[in-house]
Image (cartoon, grey):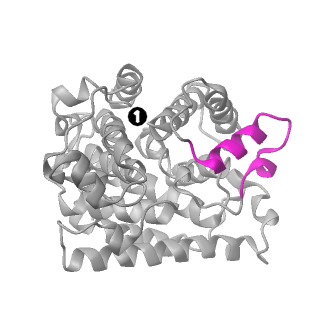
Amino acid sequence: MTTRVNSRAKQAATGSLIGLALGDALGFPTEFIGVPAILAKCGPWREMRLPAPAIVTDDTQMTLAVGHGIRAAMDRGLLGPRRLERPVREGFVRWYHSPENNRAPGRTCMVACGLLDTDLRWQQASQLGSKGCGANMRVAPVGLAPGLSEEQRAGAAQLQSALTHGHPTALAASDLTARAVFLLAQGADPVGLVGQLRSYAYENRTRYHDRWLGDLWTYAHDETPAAFMARGWDECLDALDRVLKALHNPSPETDPCLETGDGWVAEEALATALVCFLLFPDEPLTALRRAACTKGDSDSIACLTGAFAGAHLGVAAWPKEWAERIEYRSELLTLGALWDA
C-alpha cells in the first residue's frame, strides 16, 4: 500500500535529480573497472569521496534532455505523444551535437540520435535490438513530473526509451523505473516497493501503448503487439525476482552485480540499483557508494540508486558540500524546484 506524503515538503523532485547526478559523478571514475581496482583506487567503499570536480556523464546530460522536453511539452498543454516527442527528440539531437557529449556515451544512443537528426520517423530511428541501460538511466523526470495519469506516465516513459532503445525490455524497464521513482516520491514504503513493481509488471504484461508507440512493434518479429511487450515484461519480472532473492539474504559487503547483473542492460540496471537502494533505504550516501563500487556500469547503477534515494528522502538526503559541487547543479535545481512547487 502506498503511503501518501507531501512530496513538495520533502522536495522529492529536487532530491531525486540531485541524487541521480551525485550517483553519476561518484560512479563515473569507477565504470569499466572491477571492485578490487576500485578499492585500490578509492579506498574502503564505505568511505568513497565525491570526485573534485564532480563531473557527470551522459546519464545526467540525457536526464536533463528528457526533463526539459517534458517541461516544454507540459507548458503547451496536456501531455501526449506528439507533444512530447518533438522536444525530447530535439533535446537528444542537441546532446548528440554538443561538445560536452564527450563522456563515453553509449553506442545505441549515438546511432539512434544520429538517425533522429534526419527526416526519418522516430520508429525507424529506434534501435529495436538494444535494451541498453541508456533507456532508463534518464527516465526519472517522467516519474517526477506532477499531475500525470498512469497512462501518461507509462506512455511517456516508454516513448522516451523508444526514441533510441526500442527493445521491449527497454520499454518495460523504463516504465518500471519511472514507476519506482513516482511511488517513492509519493511516500511508498521501500519494504513493499518490489512487490508493487511486480504487481504493476503483471498488470501491464501484454499492454501495448499504441497511442504512444504507434507501429513500433511491427519493426520487430513478434506476431502481435501483446507478444512484443510480454517479452520485455517477462525479462523485467525475472530481474525483480533476482532482487527479492538478493534481499532475502542480504550481503552488503558483496558486489550486488553478482546477484542482479552488471547493469549494462536496462533490466539489470534497474535491478542492481534497487538492491543498492533497498540495502540502505535510510543511508543514501552508503547506498550511492555501494552502487559506485560495483564491477558493472557503475555510473548508471549509482545514478538510478540516487534517483530512488532522493525521491524517497527528498533533498535533505544529500550533504550540502556534495550537492553544491555537482555539475549542472543550476539546471537540476531549476527543474526540481518547478516540480516541487
- In this rendering, the count of numbered labels is 1
Identified at 40% across, 24% down, the residue is 328
Camera-side residue: 177 or 242?
A: 242
Counting from the top left corner in percent of width and height, residue 119 is at 86, 36
**Can you see residue 324?**
yes
Q: Amino acid at mark 1?
A: Val
Q: Left or right of 284: which side holds 212?
A: right
Identified at 81% across, 50% down, the residue is 124
**Please, what is the dominant secondary structure of the magenta stretch?**
helix
Query: Which quarter of the image is occupied by the C terminus?
Result: top left
Q: Residues within 10 Å of mark 1 (few under 14, many from 20)?
A: many
Q: Left or right of 60: which side holds 205?
A: right
Counting from the top left corner in percent of width and height, residue 327 is at 37, 25
The residue segment tinted magenta is 105-127
**Can you see residue 2?**
no
Q: Left or right of 119: which side holds 240?
A: left
Tag 1 residue: 56
Q: Where is 14 relative to 158, above or below? A: above
Callout 1: SS: loop
Counting from the top left corner in percent of width and height, residue 290 is at 24, 56
Identified at 17% across, 26% down, the residue is 321
